[in-house]
Image: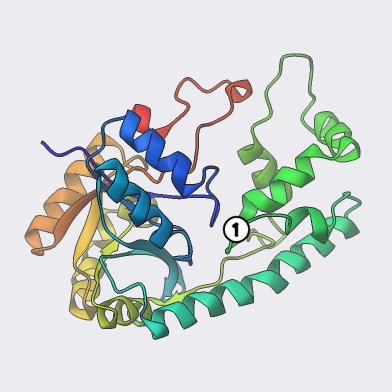
Amino acid sequence: MIKTDLHFHSYYSDGIYSPKELVKKLKEKKFQKVALTDHNTIDGVDEFLILTKKAGLKAIAGVEIYTDYQGRSFHLLGYDFNLSDKNLSFSLKELQRQRIPRIKKAIKILQMDGWKLNEKEVFNTISSYQGLIHLAGPFQKNPQNWKRIKKDFNWFPGKIIPITEIIAKYFVGKDGHLICSETTLPFIQAIKLIKKAGGWTVLAHPGQHLSWRDDGLIVEFKKMGLDGLEAISSHHSWSEMEHWQKVAKENDLEITIGSDFHGDVPKEWGFKVRSQWEY
C-alpha cells in the first residue's frame, strides 16, 4: 500500500508550516505520494516539488480553489497541471487580489466594534492568500482584545478558548455570514482552468458541503468535467467515507485521500488529536 495524502496546506495560504517543514514531516510519517494544495495559490508548489524529489517522495502539482455553484460553496482540488499555465496563474492572482479589500473591510468592521487590530499586523505574512487565521492570530494576541475575549467566554485559569471558537463568535456578521467571505470562481470555470492546464479535478471533502440527498449534483459535476471525489477525508465520518466511495464508483470517478492538514493544533487547546495525520 502506498501511503498517500493529496490535500494539505503550507504558509503560502492558511497553513502553519513552510514547504520545507512539510516535506520533513511527510518524510518522518513515511508518506510516499503527496500533493501540496494551498487555497487559491500555487506559489509554494514549485519549491515543494523540488524538495520532495530530493527527499525521495512522489509528488504532483496541486491547488485548492474556492468555487461557487448555484449559490453554494465548493472546494475544487486540481492536480498534475502545468505550473506555467498563464490562464491558471492569472486567475489565481486575481482571486488573491480580490481578497485584500475583503480582509481590509473585515478589519474595519472589527475596529468599529471596539477591537484593536491593524492592517500591518494582519498582512505581515508570507501568505499569498490570507485566510481567517491571519485575522484571528493578531486579533487574539492583542492584550486588550484578550481581556475582552476572556470576559465574553467567562474565562478562568486553565480554561481553553480555541481560536476556532473565537472565529465563530466574532467573525460572523448579523446576517449569519462571515465578515470576510472567500473569493471564488464559478465551479465550471475552475474545472476548465485546471483541464486547460493539463490537470485533473477532484471535489474536496464532499461530505462537508453535501448530504446523500445531493448525490445528483455529482452527476452534474461529472458532466462539467469533474474527475474524482475526495472520499477519504478527515472531514468525513466512517459512514460518509463509505458513501462517497460508493458514489464515486457509481459515477466512474477517481477516489482520492486527503487530510486537509493545516498544521498541528497547539497543545494548550487541549484537543486529544492534534493533527489530521493522527487519525
Q: Nearer the viewer, residue 31 or 105?
A: 31
In the rendered view, would you say 246 is above or below 130?
Answer: above
User: Circle 1 sits in a helix, a strand or a loop, which is it?
Assistant: loop
Which percent across, then down, holds residue 258?
Answer: 30, 46
129 displayed left or right of 103: left
Q: Nearer the viewer, residue 106 or 220?
A: 106
Seen at 40% across and 79% down, the residue is 88
In the rendered view, would you say 2 is above or below 273?
Answer: below
Q: Nearer the viewer, residue 239 or 197?
A: 197
The image quadrant of residue 252 is bottom left
Seen at 19% across and 47% down, the residue is 243
Seen at 15% across and 49% down, the residue is 245
The image quadrant of residue 102 is bottom right
**Residue 133 visible within the image:** yes
Which percent across, then down, holds residue 256?
Answer: 21, 51
Q: Nearer the viewer, residue 231 or 30?
A: 30
158 displayed left or right of 249: right
214 displayed left or right of 48: left
Seen at 61% across and 65% down, the residue is 181
**Residue 6 visible within the image:** no
Dot 1: few (<14), some (14–19), or many (≥20) neighbours within 10 Å?
many
> Which colour assignment does the render follow?
rainbow
Q: Which residue is mark 1?
A: 127
Which percent across, then down, holds residue 50?
Answer: 35, 55
Q: Amino acid at mark 1?
A: Ser
In the rendered view, would you say 188 is above or below 52?
Answer: below
